[in-house]
Amino acid sequence: MFQQLLFAAVVSGALYALVALGLNLVYGSLRLLNIAHGDLVMIGAYTAFWSFTLLGLSPVVSLATTTVLCAAFGFLVYVVLLKRQLGSPALAQRLEANSLIIFYGLSVILQNGASLAFSATSRGYQFLDGVHSFAGVSATGSMLLLLGVAALITLGALAFLRFHVAGWSLLAVIERRDAAAVVGVNVERVQMISICAGFAIAGIAGVLVSMTQQITPFMGFPFTIAAFVVVIMGGLGNIAAGIAAGFVLGFIETFGVALTSATYRSILIYGIFVGVLLLRPQGLFGKAVQAR
């Protein structure tokens, strides 16, 4: 029983870490609150579903097509909604203040557009649903694939930030945007790549979710909330801590639900969110800043 719960916690944590990674990239580099982030998960899920049911394409193939689709959508959002305003310091400040409203409008459009196109009926498909047992743990092939892909992307992101010059540029923009521009970092390009990557990662998470859960046009909101909880726990813009916080949330949720009831899942998540904001507003892994 404990081994099964432990495995479920690791899978949930890996998914939360992956979803929050995309959100953290966008907030860290652009300082924008993308509350439509979960709806990108929904887009990825529907892309995989229709590719599988209509075209017979494996969700593994959909990982690639969804990456391109969501990255292109991120590029479109950047060019149409954000680029001009980010180019002006005064407009950029206004954009940061109003980003919640902008992305809320985008969320409403995506949700209702999907509902009109696909109806609000829950949908699902079976892929790699055979059960594998090892070390007292039973898992479907789709869960193992989810865990493997999530681990590959999160570890790859950490390695990219640690060892690649473009990763250093991204970290510089996250830490001090103005200082990064002074030393020659192309902030505009970094921001464009960040939003494309953030949208693509959310779409990939959606493909993985579609293999293990029912999907609906309104499935994104819980993922948005979970991603924000993870980002707050790790510290806004702290990529590595955000990934660790994803696993912390996965463990708390899984064992919390096991010890209480599934009806308490939302209470646990919101409770963690409020508790961190009150007790550790800088995040569980951040350092407190003293006012002077």
Image (tube, rainbow, N blue to C red):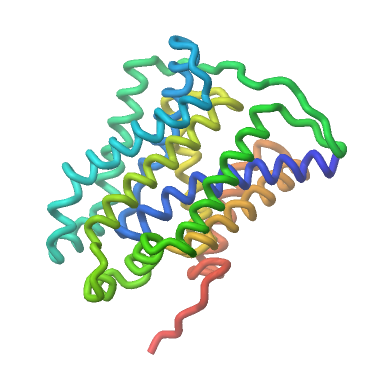
Q: Residue at x 73, y 20 (%)?
A: 130
| Residue 236 seen in the current view | no
- The location of residue 290, given as percent across then percent down, is 45, 85
Q: Is residue 199 above or below residue 132?
A: below
User: Which quadrant would the N terminus be assigned to in this image?
Assistant: top right
Question: Farthest residue in the bottom direction?
Answer: 292
Q: Residue at x 47, y 31 (%)?
A: 63
Asked if residue 276 lies left or right of residue 83, the reply is right
Q: Is residue 272 above or below residue 202?
A: below
Q: Is residue 47 above or below residue 25?
A: above
Q: Is residue 181 above or below residue 112?
A: below
- The location of residue 284, given as percent across then percent down, is 57, 67
- The quarter of the picture where residue 175 lies is bottom left
- The location of residue 239, given as percent across then percent down, is 48, 60
User: Which quadrant would the C terminus be assigned to in this image?
Assistant: bottom left
Question: Farthest residue in the front direction?
Answer: 164
- The quarter of the picture where residue 214 lies is top right
Q: Residue at x 32, y 48 (%)?
A: 195
Asked if residue 120 lies left or right of residue 271, the reply is left
Residue in the foreground of this view, choosing between 58 and 16: 58
| Residue 287 seen in the current view | yes
Q: Residue at x 35, y 53 (%)?
A: 26
